[in-house]
């Protein structure tokens, strides 16, 4: 009997933001180099250029990624993930073949038919949660921005170059633009309990 593969249910509900998490193959730290992080940022930018989504927040960790976005028009989450992940994966595998072929066996994945392929990302669709409230959006943005702090990579979330924390704090879109104009603002009706959750410079 073939092993059961866990599937990720997706709900492409119009107007819902999404909290996405996807991991590197075997949780390897494939995103611990600036070059691979830049490839991922360029893939996010590609999705924005194609007007597939508004990017509200992100953080790139050594072995996984969190993204909060709002799909546009008829764009489906599966298509968005394909755009982001395939672009990054193709560039990474080309670089490894040309510069570090001895590393490729670590990315080899046996297929059910007996063949092998190289994977940059873990099998499956990762984690996908619909965000239906303003408070939920802000709490998740704060949560992902604090990832590098919890890991001990930096002392303040704004010190981590590979996230949108500093962009939200300073208003300067580096290293990639975020679509803050479409992000919802907290009000007293949103049960704000911990200050302005979008203000991550604390």
Image: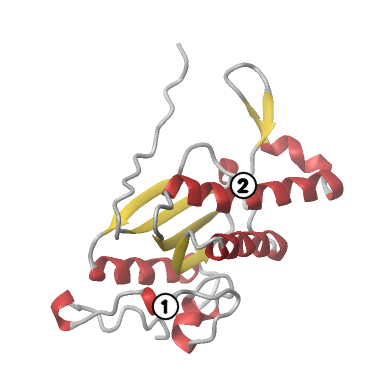
Q: Which residue is mark 1?
A: 180
Residue toward you, 103 or 42: 42
Residue sitting at the far top:
1
Residue 186 relative to residue 18: left or right: left
The residue lying at 35 percent from left, 74 percent from top is: 183
Mark 2–mark 1 Cα distance, whole angstroms, equals 26 Å
Q: Which image quadrant for residue 38?
A: bottom right
Circle 1 Cα neighbour tier, 10 Å, few/some/many (<14 / 14–19 / ≥20) = some
Which badge, 2 or 1, comes first in the chain's sequence? 2
Q: How is the image coloured?
A: secondary structure
Whether residue 130 is situated above or below residue 26 in the rendered picture: below
Residue 32 relative to residue 198: left or right: right
The residue lying at 46 percent from left, 20 percent from top is: 3
Provide residue 135's location: percent of width, then percent of height: 24, 70
Res. 86 mark: 2
Residue toward you, 178 or 109: 178
- State yes or no: discs 2 and 1 in contact (Cβ < 8 Å): no
Residue sitting at the far bottom:
170
Mark 1 lies on a secondary structure that is helix
Provide residue 154's location: percent of width, then percent of height: 54, 75
- Answer yes or no: is residue 156 visible: no
Whether residue 169 is situated above or below residue 110 in the rendered picture: below
The mark tally for this picture is 2
Residue sitting at the far front:
73
Res. 64 mark: none
The residue lying at 37 percent from left, 72 percent from top is: 142
The residue lying at 19 percent from left, 78 percent from top is: 193
Circle 2 Cα neighbour tier, 10 Å, few/some/many (<14 / 14–19 / ≥20) = some
Provide residue 95's location: percent of width, then percent of height: 79, 51
């Amino acid at each position: 009997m073939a092993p059961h593969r866990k599937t990720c249910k997706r709900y492409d509900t119009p107007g819902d933001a999404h909290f996405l998490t996807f991991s590197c193959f075997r949780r390897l730290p494939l995103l611990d180099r600036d070059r691979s992080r830049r490839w991922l940022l360029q893939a996010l930018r590609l999705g924005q250029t194609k007007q597939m989504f508004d990017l509200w927040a992100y953080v790139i960790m050594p072995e996984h990624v969190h993204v909060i976005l709002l799909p546009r028009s008829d764009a489906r989450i599966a298509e968005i993930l394909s755009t982001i992940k395939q672009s990054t994966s193709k560039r990474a595998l080309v670089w490894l073949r040309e510069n570090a072929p001895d590393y490729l066996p670590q990315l080899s994945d046996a297929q059910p038919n007996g063949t092998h392929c190289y994977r940059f990302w873990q099998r499956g669709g990762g984690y996908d949660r619909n965000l239906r409230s303003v408070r939920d959006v802000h709490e998740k943005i704060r949560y992902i921005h604090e990832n590098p702090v919890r890991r001990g990579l930096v002392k303040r979330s704004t010190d981590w170059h590979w996230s949108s924390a500093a962009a939200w704090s300073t208003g300067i879109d580096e290293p990639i633009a975020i679509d803050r104009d479409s992000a919802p603002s907290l009000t007293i009706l949103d049960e704000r309990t911990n200050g302005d959750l979008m203000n991550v410079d604390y």
